[in-house]
Each structure stands twice: as structure tokens, then as C-alpha cells.
Image (cartoon, rainbow, N blue to C red):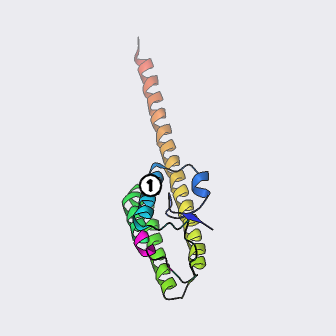
Amino acid sequence: MAVVLGAAFVMPVGVASAKKLSEPGKVMDERLAECAEEYAYDPNKAEGLGEYDLAPTELDWRRCAYQGVREIMIPNSRIPDAYRRLIDEDRAMTERIQRREMTRSERRARLDQILESVRAQEKERSLRNLERQQTELKARMAEIERMRRIQSMMRP
């Protein structure tokens, strides 16, 4: 499956385009395009690599992608530690590929699992934040209504 590093670091193609990307996600996509141009490596177009092979500039590209995640996604996330773990796990899995202990396909499958978890965590945090904001708004509206009633009782 081809991948796009984007809103949640690495996404199956189609997911990034099917879901509306947040502003940080769009900026991250731009950063990844810059990484691809700078290192002449695009994970979506990498062909002819064996299961234990890395492209000649893949490690440089990945470091560029990690830096983008650190600068763009982590500061804008409600779950920054999940992105840090994603980077750590991707780095460890890439090292395992180099040692022929893991295949590219296995890394891809594991990254898909991690990313699904990150997306679910982001969604859960967003929903909880929205619920908190709604509760606060209801409390403010109730206070305003109470003040209006008091004010109307004070009118002659």
C-alpha cells in the first residue's frame, strides 16, 4: 500500500485526501513534499526495493520527516507523546529492517496500526475538548440568563 506522510505522519493514500486535513496536516504535507524534493526520495514512488532494503536517501528523508513532525504536528497536537512514540517506533523498525529483522511490509503494517491509534486518540481528545467547551458555554449562557432575570426584576 502506498503511503503519504501527512496529517498523522504516515497515512495510506486516499485517507489523507478523503479526510479534510487540518492546517497542521496541510503544512506537514508541504514539508514532506520538500523533504521528497531535497532527498530525491518519495515513499509513494519507491520501487524496486527488497523487503530488507532502504533507498539510498531514505534515512535522510525520514530524518527530515521526523523533524517536520516535531516542528509541526507535536506543537499542534493534544497528544504530542503519541507522535513522539510514532517517531521512536518508526526509527526502531527502520533499524530492524537494516538488520534484516523486520521487513518493509511488516513496518508498513505496524505503522498503519500505530497511526490508526493516533487518529483515534486525536479524535477522542477533540471530542472531549468539544464536550468541555459545550459544558462551559452552557454554564455561561445560564449565568447570562440569570443576570438578565435579576436585571429585569430590578427595573421599575
Q: Secondary structure at mark 1?
A: helix
List the residue tagged with mark 1.
30
Residue 78 visible to an observer of this rendering: no
Instruction: Return the x and y of residue 96 as percentages of the image width and height.
Output: 50, 84
Mark 1 surroundings within 10 Å by alpha-carbon count, few (fewer than 14), some (14 through 19), many (20 or more) = some
**In the image, is residue 151 above or below residue 137?**
above
Q: Residue at x 52, y 82 (%)?
A: 53
Amino acid on which disc 1 is placed? Glu
Residue 6 visible to an observer of this rendering: yes
- Which quadrant of the structure image shows residue 103? bottom right
Q: Seen in the image, is 93 located left or right of residue 1?
A: left
Front position in the image: 53 or 100: 53
Instruction: Return the x and y of residue 134 as percentages of the image width and height.
Output: 51, 42
- Which quadrant of the structure image shows residue 148? top left
Quadrant where the N terminus is found in the figure: bottom right
Quadrant where the C terminus is found in the figure: top left
Q: Residue at x 45, y 73 (%)?
A: 58
Instruction: Return the x and y of residue 10 as percentages of the image width and height.
Output: 52, 64
- Which quadrant of the structure image shows residue 101? bottom right
Front position in the image: 25 or 139: 25
Front position in the image: 148 or 45: 45
Find out whether residue 10 is within the magenta segment.
Answer: no
Q: Residue at x 44, y 33 (%)?
A: 143
Instruction: Return the x and y of residue 72 as percentages of the image width and height.
Output: 39, 57
Find out whether residue 57 is within the magenta segment.
Answer: yes
Magenta-highlighted residues:
54-61
Report the label total: 1
Residue at the far top in the pictured view? 156
